[in-house]
Amino acid sequence: MLLAIDVRNAFAEIGVLRGEELVWTDQLSVDMKRTESEYAILLASLLRLRHVENDAIDGAIIASVVPPLTARIERAAKRVTGITPLVVGPGVKNGLVIRIDDPKTLGADLVADSVGALARYGAPAIIIDFGTATTLAYLNGRGEYRGGAICPGLMLAYDALFQGTSMLTRISFDHPGRVVGTSTVECMKSGAIYGTASMIDGMIDRFLLEQKDNPVLVATGAHAEEVLPHMAHQVHYDPELMIYGLAAIYKKNR
């Protein structure tokens, strides 16, 4: 079985695959203060909870957007499984033709998302990842990565709004009910959900005007479920897109 680990700023998504089949996914919170041993204990506990024997894992791959944690989690995974994980980065074959100014600067998350989208949906494609940052990636009709956009993520933007104002409070991101709010909380929810949906719809429209093709639209990430129902564009929701992308990258490097 393959262990795939997607390290984000707030959490790490853990996936286990048997061949092409995704057996399960789960999440662990990430903390810069945790040691290698603590991550190893958490990972071993999660595998045990999911009834996976450590020696059943015969491959491992990691994508990380938190460089200070990458080596720590890599060593933790090796301690648990006995296998040195493949870490997505320069020099690792991914099958993705990257046509931007400096391909080495493309984040491992965008690489894995794009590889997953190509494998599962084809090209051209626009991939939206609702994470700490909300990213849009564009693949042309030949499946080449041509660039994209990076916007503040939903949680990040509203944490900044809360911290930067005296009268606004923290909110949940459930359905706001209506666009024109009649209380402070309703107004903030409207801005968060409808505002983000409108921003992404608008960005997609601008991508379409500039690129002049008919891409498939794919979304993933922590806040996709809150935003997608309120968008005008029809978007495929694929919560495990990056895990599938990591599996495809691992297969190319075996």
Image (tube, rainbow, N blue to C red):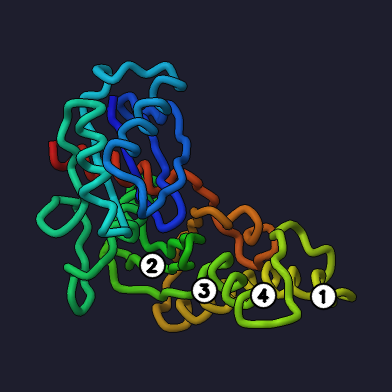
How far apart in space, not on screen, are marks 4 and 3 (Cα)?
14 Å
**For mark 2, what is the residue?**
137
Please state the horizontal and vertical placement of residue 187, each as a whole percent of the image: 79, 75
Front position in the image: 11 or 222: 11
Is the residue marked by circle 3 packed among few (<14), some (14-19), or many (20+) residues within 10 Å? Answer: many
Front position in the image: 230 or 61: 61
Q: Residue at 21% of width from left, 30% of height from top?
A: 79
Label number found at residue 204 = 3
Whichever of callouts 1 and 3 sits on the residue coming sooner in the sequence is 1
Front position in the image: 109 or 197: 109
* Residue type pointed to by label 1: Thr
Give the foreground label among 4 and 2: 4
Instruction: Give the left or right position of residue 87, taking residue 229 as reference.
Output: left
Is the residue marked by circle 2 packed among few (<14), some (14-19), or many (20+) residues within 10 Å? Answer: many
Please state the horizontal and vertical placement of residue 4, each as a whole percent of the image: 32, 38
Label number found at residue 207 = none
| Name of the residue lying farthest toward the right | 182
Please state the horizontal and vertical placement of residue 117, each as a whole percent of the image: 38, 52
Q: Are marks 4 and 3 in contact (CB under 8 Å)?
A: no
**For mark 1, what is the residue?**
184
**For mark 4, what is the residue?**
195
Whichever of callouts 1 and 4 sits on the residue coming sooner in the sequence is 1
Q: Quadrant of the N terminus?
A: top left
Tell me if residue 122 can be seen: no
* Residue type pointed to by label 4: Gly
Secondary structure at badge 3 equals: helix
